[in-house]
Image: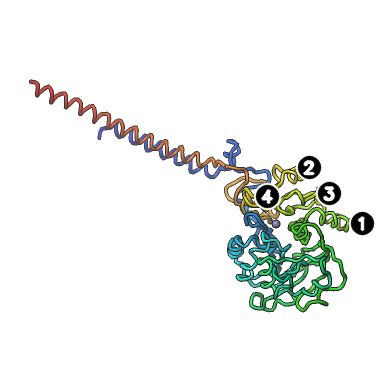
Amino acid sequence: MNERKKKIIITKAIIIVVLGLVLGISCFFSKPIERALGIGKKETSYVEGAKIDENDLSVNFIDVGQGDSTLIILPDDTVMLIDAGKASAGDKVVSYLQEKDITTIDYFILTHSDEDHSGGAKKVFDEFDIKTVYRPFQISVTKETGEASESEDLEEYLDIYGSKINKISTAVYRNFITAAYNEEYAPGLFADVIVHSEGVKIVSKDSTKPFTFEFFAPLKIDDTPVSEHSTKTSGYPTKYYSGSLAESNNAASPIMLLEYKDNSFVFTGDAPEVVEEDFLQSIADKESVKERFSDVDVYSAGHHGSKTSSCQDFLNQIDPTYTVVSCGKDNSYGHPNQEFVDRVNSLTHRVEDYLLRTDTMGDISFGYYDGQLVGAENDLVIGQLIYVANKSGEGVVIYWWYIALGTFIVLSIVIISVKVSKNKMTTAKRFVKQTEKVTKKLKD
Ligand SMILES: [Zn+2]
């Protein structure tokens, strides 16, 4: 090998190594590069790579497609699950909890009977120890006879309220009721099934980390506790809303407020406008409650962002920073509805950075920043309420390093192949020359 060839090879090797080094080092400056190029994930309310403190409160909106399931790990280490998505989402909910090493659910709240909330409950009961169940005042009946299903503990109310009670004949709701009252599913659970209504409260078991989780709807309609008409249930009968079956079912949903530190979270299941208005009226002269329901940090949008929930009065009252919509990709209901989006957009925190959707962002978790974020600049303060999600929700995200790595590989190939093609060229020239020589000799 002559000196010139050696030099060329060394130069090429140096170029490739330098390019590789530049690429490697630039990985540590990914955020400034993304910012400079104007690509990558949006940052205003989201910092990639940030983690939430696993030893403190976390509110996790599980991506269950079209449906709802929210896991709350409370500051006193107790575990709450609000709804469990459709039956087909049961496995996802179970694995999501198992990945967090959860074995016991201290509070299982079923907002209402609809399949997209109750369907996965049976699988959850199969896999975890459930300590307390909060159920809606909806009576499980059989389709054939209209009588209470076998495990239903509130059957007396069918006689007490007659037609003015919400009767549910679906198999998924019957499965939930069976699981909630069945000794096999829930050993020792009896008498820990509670009908949710205004006034029901869950407080911290750890006095150093006080929080309050409180129900404000549905409204009670009777001051006689259900325990007078049941053997295994406590709580109070709640208001019945007539209308279509779907409306009536959705209206069994509670309005719930979680307060911890300076933060507040509101959950409303599929509660429609009529429930929101009733609630607002019930707190109209309660300034302290109105105060608690103002400037909410996170609002789990009622009924997956349907236009029939999140009425303007309710939104104006809570004026949420973040609004989270749990819905399926390209769902047939058109959730979140444009009218709902427009209403959210009229608030202080408009939709652009503050409307989060599970269909585009996957699982979304709120919690407190743990202070550990390697390799990126950020303005986060330890203990600040942040959210993390699977995806940024900004559509197709072009990572700058995909481009950089692609360019590196292409350049390397070009640099190497130039040499090869040059060699080929000389070989071809040599071949032509030799052929010419041979032809010449033959001619001679
Ligand atoms: Zn729903």
Mark 2 or mark 3: which comes first in sequence? 3
Q: The disc labelled 2 sits on which kind of residue?
A: Ser
Q: Which residue is mark 4?
A: 333
Callout in the foreground (3, 4): 4
Q: Which residue is mark 2?
A: 346
Mark 2 or mark 4: which comes first in sequence? 4
Residue at the farthest top position = 444
**Is residue 94 at least partly visible in the picture?**
yes
Say which element carries label 4: loop
Q: Which residue is mark 3?
A: 313
* Circle 2/circle 4 CB separation < 8 Å: no
Question: Label 3: few (<14), some or many (≥20) within 10 Å?
Answer: some
Is 200 positioned to the left or the right of 101 in the image?
Answer: right
Q: Quadrant of ligand 1?
A: bottom right
Alpha carbons under labels 3 and 1: distance apart: 15 Å
Mark 3 or mark 1: which comes first in sequence? 1
Quadrant occupied by the C terminus? top left
- Residue 285 is labelled as 1
Residue 51 lies, in percent from the top left, at 63, 54
